Image: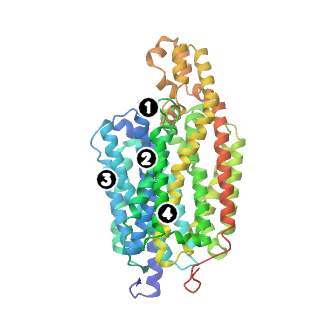
């Protein structure tokens, strides 16, 4: 084991270094999460820019890969890159990540092809971005844990986490605004900031703490990467409709992905117990604060990860059109109307982190999970066409609870780790969170589709026939997979104007055609069915939050790893 410390500097220099480390890592977290949600909002413009109709056959898979490929790659590699930080220096791996992320952003902006080839290029370049993001997300918390004393780590990690969560909401505004200028600007936005951040990190960050020289786990790394990739690919394609069903969960491809992935992950666990220098240190889960904190974080990701996307669809597909907003501008306005959630995070995130430095994470994280469950219960009681002040108050409450949970929980996990394993432990924490988000999206979309299938086809068919649409066409539209019109609304398209052939609409009296394609017609048809599905989604989210609350409570009191305790 080799201990690398700061160069001898004055006490004032040490104080300055920790703030430099905080500001640089916070910039990377902010940029990384802005990138995720800005792309989410700009997808309609991106697909139009490369010449793809997002509702054409086969486009759903491309859309999901552009959206989720970044998260998949980050989830797969973040543990390995955290382990590399332990071995070769966290700041060194972090610096490399900033450079790779910036290069990936530039390549995305320079995508030269159109059609499916352009989409595949963009997916590939998003993978490069994800590789850079994995280096950043794995090593940022470890760098801060090394730089700050234990009585300030909660505050530092809290600011870092709040920047990430706040960036995910800021990205909604950035994506909406930049997409008005041109889709390439959504990616170019990252480049100058990334160049500045890369140069700044290379010039100022240095290795502080413990670096352990070990061999790379050549067997465990590819086994874990292959197994996790197969499971997450199965989750992505499970959402996509098959030839015989509204979803693809029972197709041979999805079943083989899940089955093969689970077998490989089981094999990975067996491998890690036998190799000399494992990538995924399962023995860290013997530390109660580490195990309970990660379980709580995973439950939080399951509850929140997909639900934020569902909230966006709720606003874009129903509420905003009912209140006079054209479908083409709903993506931007959905971001604006969700600002109260960001305010809640920013209001409580840093404060809860600072308080957890003194009192520990147990009460803050447990209370936050309960508060989140209460917020979801309030949303359950709202009508689909709600009064906005009440909705704003509820999502502000959700933002407060998110800020209250993330900072203390992350600080508690990092404080529990031996110094030489902080990079690997940070990567494990990030992996567990990143796995939770796509799985949450898959589960929540599935529950929503099951709810919609119960009542939506009949309501849609009846409404179309009553307004003059031929029976055959009405049956075809009503039989479309719910994912089709959910994604249409999400991408800023009027679902019925897109799904009903233009010649059929042209054959109707002008008033009838205008009524069918109006802003309010589709939302009124889907209102009851959407609420049915929303109930199932919210019940699932509430259960996950309550499990997370139990996990947070059993972590015990404040715990900081020390060499003399060895526990």
State which mark lies toward you, 1 or 3.
1
The answer to which of 545 and 394 lies nearer the viewer is 545
Residue 473 versus residue 544 in the image, above or below? above
Q: Quadrant of the C terminus?
A: bottom right
Q: Earlier in the sequence, mark 1 or mark 2?
A: 2
State which mark lies toward you, 1 or 2.
1
Q: Earlier in the sequence, mark 1 or mark 4?
A: 1
Q: Which residue is mark 3?
A: 106
How far apart are the alpha carbons under marks 2 and 3? 14 Å
Q: Which residue is mark 4?
A: 269
Q: Residue at x 41, y 79 (%)?
A: 211
CB within 8 Å, label 4 to label 3: no
Residue 534 versus residue 288 in the image, above or below? above
Tell me, yes or no, if residue 350 can be seen here: no
Q: Hey, which quadrant is residue 101 in on the image?
A: bottom left
Q: Earlier in the sequence, mark 4 or mark 3?
A: 3
Q: Earlier in the sequence, mark 2 or mark 4?
A: 2
């Amino acid at each position: 084991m080799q201990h690398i410390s700061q160069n001898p500097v004055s006490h004032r220099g040490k104080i300055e270094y920790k703030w430099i480390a905080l500001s640089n890592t916070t910039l990377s977290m902010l940029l990384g999460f802005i990138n995720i949600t800005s792309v989410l909002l700009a997808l309609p413009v991106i697909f139009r820019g490369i010449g793809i109709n997002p509702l054409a056959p086969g486009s759903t898979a491309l859309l999901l890969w552009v959206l989720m490929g970044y998260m998949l790659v980050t989830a797969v590699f973040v543990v390995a890159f955290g382990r590399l930080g332990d071995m070769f220096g966290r700041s060194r791996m972090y610096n490399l990540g900033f450079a790779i992320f910036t290069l990936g952003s530039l390549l995305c902006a320079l995508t030269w092809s159109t059609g499916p080839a352009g989409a595949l290029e963009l997916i590939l370049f998003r993978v490069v971005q994800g590789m850079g993001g994995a280096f950043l997300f794995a090593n940022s918390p470890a760098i801060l844990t090394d730089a700050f004393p234990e009585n300030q780590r909660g505050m530092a990690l809290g600011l870092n986490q709040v920047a990430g969560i706040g960036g995910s909401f800021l990205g909604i505004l950035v994506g909406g605004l930049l997409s008005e200028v041109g889709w390439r600007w959504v990616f170019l936005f990252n480049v100058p900031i990334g160049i500045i951040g890369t140069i700044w990190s290379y010039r100022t960050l240095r290795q502080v703490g413990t670096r352990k020289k070990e061999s790379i786990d050549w067997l465990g790394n590819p086994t874990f990467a292959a197994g996790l990739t197969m499971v997450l690919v199965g989750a992505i394609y499970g959402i996509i409709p098959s030839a015989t069903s509204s979803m693809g969960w029972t197709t041979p491809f999805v079943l083989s992905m899940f089955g093969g992935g689970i077998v490989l992950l089981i094999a990975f666990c067996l491998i890690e117990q036998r190799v000399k220098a494992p990538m995924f240190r399962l023995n860290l889960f013997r530390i109660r604060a580490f195990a309970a904190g990660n379980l709580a974080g995973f439950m939080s990701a399951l509850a929140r990860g997909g639900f934020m996307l569902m909230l966006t669809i709720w606003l874009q597909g129903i509420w905003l059109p009912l209140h006079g907003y054209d479908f083409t501008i709903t993506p931007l306005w959905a971001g604006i109307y969700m600002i109260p959630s960001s305010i809640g995070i920013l209001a409580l995130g840093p404060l809860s982190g600072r308080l957890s430095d003194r009192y520990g994470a147990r009460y803050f994280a447990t209370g936050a999970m309960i508060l989140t469950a209460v917020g979801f219960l309030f949303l359950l009681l709202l009508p689909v066409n709600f009064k906005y002040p009440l909705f704003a108050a509820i999502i502000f409450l959700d933002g407060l609870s998110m800020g209250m949970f993330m900072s203390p929980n992350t600080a508690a996990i990092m404080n529990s780790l031996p110094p030489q394993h902080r990079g690997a432990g940070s990567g494990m924490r990030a992996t567990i969170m990143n796995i939770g988000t796509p799985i949450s999206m898959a589960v929540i979309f599935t529950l929503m589709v099951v709810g919609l299938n119960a009542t939506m086809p009949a309501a849609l068919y009846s409404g179309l026939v009553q307004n003059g649409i031929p029976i055959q066409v009405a049956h075809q539209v009503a039989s479309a997979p719910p994912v089709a019109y959910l994604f249409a609304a999400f991408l800023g398209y009027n679902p019925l104007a897109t799904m009903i052939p233009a010649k059929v609409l042209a054959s109707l009296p002008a008033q009838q055609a205008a009524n069918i394609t109006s802003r309010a017609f589709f939302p009124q048809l889907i209102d009851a069915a959407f609420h049915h599905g929303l109930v199932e989604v919210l019940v699932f989210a509430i259960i996950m939050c309550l499990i997370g609350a139990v996990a947070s409570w059993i972590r015990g009191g404040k715990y900081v790893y020390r060499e003399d305790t060895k526990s």
